[in-house]
Image (cartoon, rainbow, N blue to C red):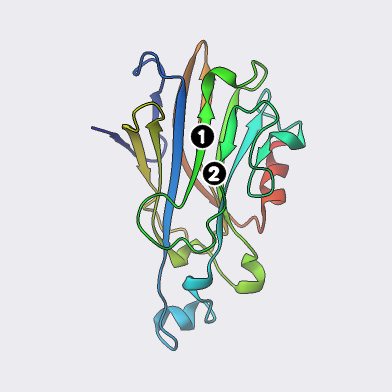
């Protein structure tokens, strides 16, 4: 049974799962369907949840710093140059059950000089559309063993993220020879991915 984490908790990925070499990181969310003229329509200026495009991305860090453009994995660059991180593609609506976007990580192929993978989500064109994560529900990140699809852990982002247009969801990082997972769940007002990356420059 998968371990359910709370914000701020950390867990050993590889130590607790001997032989684990490749993981699937799934991220999911549901836009809140807003009725025109209702409470949400008044609060959010009529921004429509149905037209909300949320993007998941991975920032690969060297000594906690972002140093190479090729180590930013997102809908415009689906695979890292080292081929250790692969984004399976963009979901522009967030509709339907299950993961909305997935990232496959081959832990054994991550270059030795990369110590951390940061998983972030942001709302595309959020300023123009007047959208934020207060209009999103059921957001989560989970990690599966790629070899058998067993769910290892899940972190539900259950906080109120009204006003936040980007979320730093979680991190997978080296701890000696092992890999750990940290549940972050930090919201920010960064309007786009480039702005998020600047925090690590």
Q: In the shown orientation, is residue 13 left or right of residue 55?
A: left
- Residue at position x 69%, y 49% from top? 76
Mark 1 vs mark 2, CA separation in Å = 8 Å
Location of residue 113 (image quadrant): top right
Q: How many marks?
A: 2
Location of residue 84 (image quadrant): top right
- Residue at position x 76%, y 32% from top? 68
Q: Nearer the viewer, residue 115 or 57?
A: 57
Q: In the shown orientation, is residue 156 left or right of residue 116?
A: left
Where residue 44 appears, as percent x and y from the top left, is 51, 76
For the N terminus, which image quadrant?
top left
User: Which is nearer the N-term, disc 1 or disc 2?
Assistant: 2
Q: Which mark, residue 88?
A: 2
Q: Nearer the viewer, residue 11 or 15?
A: 15
Where residue 20 appears, as percent x and y from the top left, is 41, 19
Q: Which mark, residue 1?
A: none
Q: Height in image: 153 above or below 36? A: above
Q: Residue furthest left?
A: 1
Mark 1: few, some, or many residues within 10 Å (few <14, many ≥20)?
A: many
Instruction: Indicate the secondary structure of the residue bearing disc 2.
Output: loop
Q: Which mark, residue 104?
A: 1
For the C terminus, which image quadrant?
top right
Q: Height in image: 42 above or below 95? A: below
Location of residue 57 (image quadrant): top right
- Residue at position x 66%, y 47% from top? 196
Instruction: Indicate the secondary structure of the residue bearing disc 1.
Output: strand
Q: Residue furthest bottom?
A: 37
Q: Height in image: 20 above or below 40? A: above
Mark 2: few, some, or many residues within 10 Å (few <14, many ≥20)?
A: some
Q: Are marks 1 and 2 in contact (CB under 8 Å)?
A: yes
């Amino acid at each position: 049974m998968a371990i359910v984490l709370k914000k701020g908790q950390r867990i050993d990925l590889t130590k607790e799962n001997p032989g684990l070499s490749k993981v699937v990181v799934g991220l999911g969310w549901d836009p809140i369907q807003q009725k025109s003229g209702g409470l949400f329509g008044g609060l959010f200026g009529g921004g429509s949840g149905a037209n909300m495009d949320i993007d998941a991305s991975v920032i690969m860090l060297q000594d906690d710093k972002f140093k190479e453009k090729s180590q930013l994995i997102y809908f415009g660059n689906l695979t890292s140059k080292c081929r250790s991180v692969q984004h399976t593609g963009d979901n522009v609506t967030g509709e339907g059950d299950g993961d909305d976007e997935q990232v496959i990580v081959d832990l054994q192929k991550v270059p030795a000089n990369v110590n951390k993978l940061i998983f972030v989500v942001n709302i595309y064109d959020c300023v123009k559309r007047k959208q934020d994560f207060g209009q999103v529900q059921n957001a989560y990140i989970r990690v599966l063993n790629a070899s058998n699809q067993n769910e290892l852990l899940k972190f539900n982002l259950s906080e109120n993220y009204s006003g936040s247009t980007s979320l730093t969801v979680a991190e997978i990082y080296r701890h000696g020879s092992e890999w750990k997972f940290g549940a972050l769940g930090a919201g920010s007002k960064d309007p786009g991915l480039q702005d998020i990356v600047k925090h690590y420059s």
